[in-house]
Amino acid sequence: MLRARRKAAGRTIASVAMDAGLSVPYIANLENARGNPTVAALQRLARALGADLQVNLADTTTTPGAAGAAGDGHGARVLAVAHRLAVAQGNDVRVVQERLEQTIAALSTVLDADCTDRDVDRLLDAVLLAVEPGR
């Protein structure tokens, strides 16, 4: 999402790094889903890109939509996979999460039954393999 935002603004990593007071390699690593930025660093990046940082602490044990189709406890995995996909695709994690939930619901329709935990695990693994073939 960081890369997509930066590119949409027509900015280089170097210009964002300078405005945010961060190093070019640090930002490059973040864009490639490496590293664990502090909230302060994220705030500086957001400001440099003309955005506001919003932190949302949500219960990930149940994800609306996925919980009904996937059984209890898959909300965290759906969210984790959504995050990986969002980073890989440069999309918003909420949009990707919603798409995954719709896919799980569609699988239930195809199976003509609720998805089991194993069904959801297999589906999420297949999605990750499609995006990260060397995984």
Image (tube, helix red, strand yellow):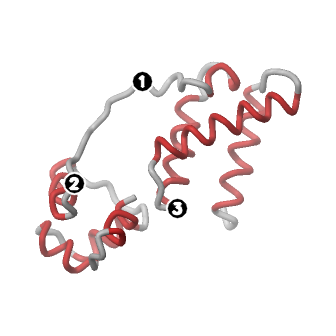
Q: Specify which label sits upstream in the sequence, 2 or 3.
A: 2
Q: Quadrant of residue 111?
A: top right
* Vertical position of residue 21 compared to residue 99: above or below: below
Q: Are marks 3 and 1 in contact (CB under 8 Å)?
A: no
Where is residue 28 shown, x and y percent of the image? 33, 73
* Residue for badge 2: 51
Q: How many marks?
A: 3
* Residue for badge 1: 59
Q: Quadrant of the N terminus?
A: bottom left
Q: Are marks 2 and 1 in contact (CB under 8 Å)?
A: no
* Residue for badge 3: 88
* Left or right of 49, for residue 77: right
Q: Choose mark 2 or mark 1, whichever is in front.
A: 2
**Residue drawn at the location 74% of the way across and 50% of the way down:** 126
Badge 3 marks a residue whose secondary structure is helix
Q: Amino acid at mark 3?
A: Ala
Badge 1 marks a residue whose secondary structure is loop
Q: CA distance from mark 3 to mark 1?
A: 24 Å
* Left or right of 99, for residue 60: left
Q: Quadrant of residue 23?
A: bottom left
Q: Specify which label sits upstream in the sequence, 2 or 1.
A: 2
